[in-house]
């Protein structure tokens, strides 16, 4: 039997070992790489890893001098030295700092978890700065705008839209309560957070829309001065929200030992959700290659379908509203332009879990 020359054998073994090392390295990188939307869902020990620290340092670079962040940025991506330099120079550009689209909330939670594992003071200081930003952004009457510093236009409205104000209040409540992730926050900030959520609760109760003497639910945004339901974008008119109101009610339900006025707000909103639910219809996606996105969204009859709620209800009539970019109120989804039908959420099972599980559980906790 012929045997391989020694040098050929060594070469083959070396190549095999090299391949194995590269494969193991790639495997390890794939395990370490975490999607941006899941960076706050990792085991505690992961937050002291090189990857976690790299992401945290990216967040420090993106954080503006005022303490907030711009929205819609994946801060887990690798940054070049040129990009890092640009971010350092842009830190004073504060006008885009916002509470919209989870901006700040992802970063504060992540930096807090990374600080608790690494004890690196850079991360705790960034959290303190961000918390101060959020509390500074609160209006004297207790509401929060979408952008801070204040940006003129609908951005300055008190904003429940997309959960902005409720996310702030949930975060500050966790801080005030000394929840595990935020147990390193100092007593002064905890006390300030408590006062902020107390003021926020008052504005929630004051803005619950009353129709013919009956409390209903909430608009997605309010005028910061007179607290009237306000218009935001062209297709977001003053209305009662079947979506944003769900988050508000859940926030109220989480209050320990609620006062009677809080209980009344919850019960009234739940009753309204029951009245306005839409049954016997279903929202479906219909494939259509002749349309720009290749599909349409249509409403069809289906007696077996679960309930839906409209994103917007007309104040005073409870009629579902469908509004396109022309700001004209229509009462059927198919009557607005295709681009809005497929590019925005006008109907959904928004309050399904609230009514079927959250509310019954809350009633049990209340002893009913």
Image (tube, rainbow, N blue to C red):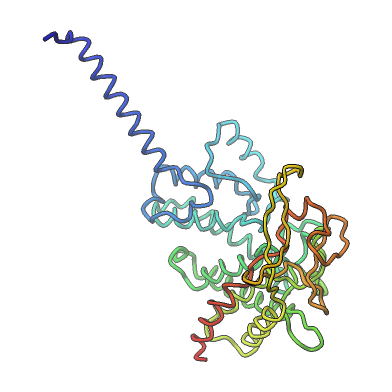
Q: In this rendering, is residue 364 above or below 192?
A: below
Residue 299 placement, left or right of 3: right
Return the x and y of residue 342 as percentages of the image width and height. 72, 53
How many numbered badges does the structure rendering display?
A: 0
Q: Please tell me which residue lies in front, 366 or 178.
A: 366
Return the x and y of residue 185 as percentages of the image width and height. 49, 65
Instruction: Tell me the quarter of the picture where residue 160 sits.
Output: bottom right
Q: Residue at x 55, y 55 (%)?
A: 106
Instruction: Tell me the quarter of the picture where residue 307 sits.
Output: bottom right
Q: Please tell me which residue lies in front, 214 or 353.
A: 353
Residue 94 placement, left or right of 44: right
Residue 333 placement, left or right of 112: right
Residue 24 placement, left or right of 13: right
The furthest residue to the left = 1
Q: Residue at x 81, y 76 (%)?
A: 315
Q: Residue at x 73, y 79 (%)?
A: 208
Q: Is residue 231 visible?
A: yes
Return the x and y of residue 48 as percentages of the image width and height. 39, 49
Position of the N terminus, as image quadrant, is: top left
Q: Residue at x 49, y 86 (%)?
A: 364
Q: Please tell me which residue lies in front, 33 or 311.
A: 311
Return the x and y of residue 67 as percentages of the image width and height. 62, 54
Q: Is residue 153 visible?
A: no
Q: In this rendering, is residue 7 above or below 57?
A: above
Q: Please tell me which residue lies in front, 184 or 256.
A: 256
């Amino acid at each position: 039997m012929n045997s391989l020359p020694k040098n050929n054998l060594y070469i083959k073994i070396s190549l095999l070992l090299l391949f194995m090392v590269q494969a193991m390295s790639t495997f390890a990188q794939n395990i370490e790489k975490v999607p941006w939307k899941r960076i706050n869902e990792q085991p505690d020990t992961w937050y002291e890893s090189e990857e976690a620290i790299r992401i945290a340092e990216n967040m420090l670079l993106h954080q503006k001098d005022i303490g907030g962040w711009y929205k819609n940025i994946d801060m887990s991506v690798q940054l070049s030295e040129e990009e890092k330099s640009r971010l350092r120079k842009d830190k004073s550009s504060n006008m885009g700092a916002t509470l919209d689209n989870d901006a700040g909330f992802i970063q504060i939670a992540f930096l807090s978890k990374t600080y608790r594992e690494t004890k690196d003071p850079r991360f705790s200081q960034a959290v303190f700065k961000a918390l101060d930003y959020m509390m500074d952004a609160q209006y004297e009457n207790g509401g929060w705008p979408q952008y801070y510093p204040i940006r003129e236009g609908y951005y300055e409205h008190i904003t429940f839209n997309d959960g902005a104000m409720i996310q702030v209040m949930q975060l500050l409540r966790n801080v005030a309560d000394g929840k595990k992730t935020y147990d390193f926050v100092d007593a002064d900030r905890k006390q300030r957070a408590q006062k902020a959520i107390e003021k926020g609760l008052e504005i929630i109760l004051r803005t619950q829309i009353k129709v013919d003497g009956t409390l209903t639910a909430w608009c997605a945004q309010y005028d910061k001065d007179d607290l009237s339901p306000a218009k935001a974008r062209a297709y977001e008119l003053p209305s009662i929200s079947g979506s944003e109101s769900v988050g508000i009610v859940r926030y109220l339900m989480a209050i320990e030992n609620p006062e009677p006025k809080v209980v009344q707000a919850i019960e009234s909103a739940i009753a309204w959700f029951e009245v306005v639910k839409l049954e016997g219809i279903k929202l479906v996606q219909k494939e259509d290659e002749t349309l720009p996105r290749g599909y349409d969204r249509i409403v069809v009859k289906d007696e077996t379908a679960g309930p839906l709620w409209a994103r917007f209800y007309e104040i005073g009539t409870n009629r579902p509203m469908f509004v396109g970019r022309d700001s004209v109120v229509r009462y059927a989804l198919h009557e607005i332009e295709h681009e809005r039908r497929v590019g925005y959420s006008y109907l959904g099972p928004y309050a399904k879990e609230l009514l079927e599980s959250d509310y019954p559980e809350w009633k049990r906790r209340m002893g009913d």
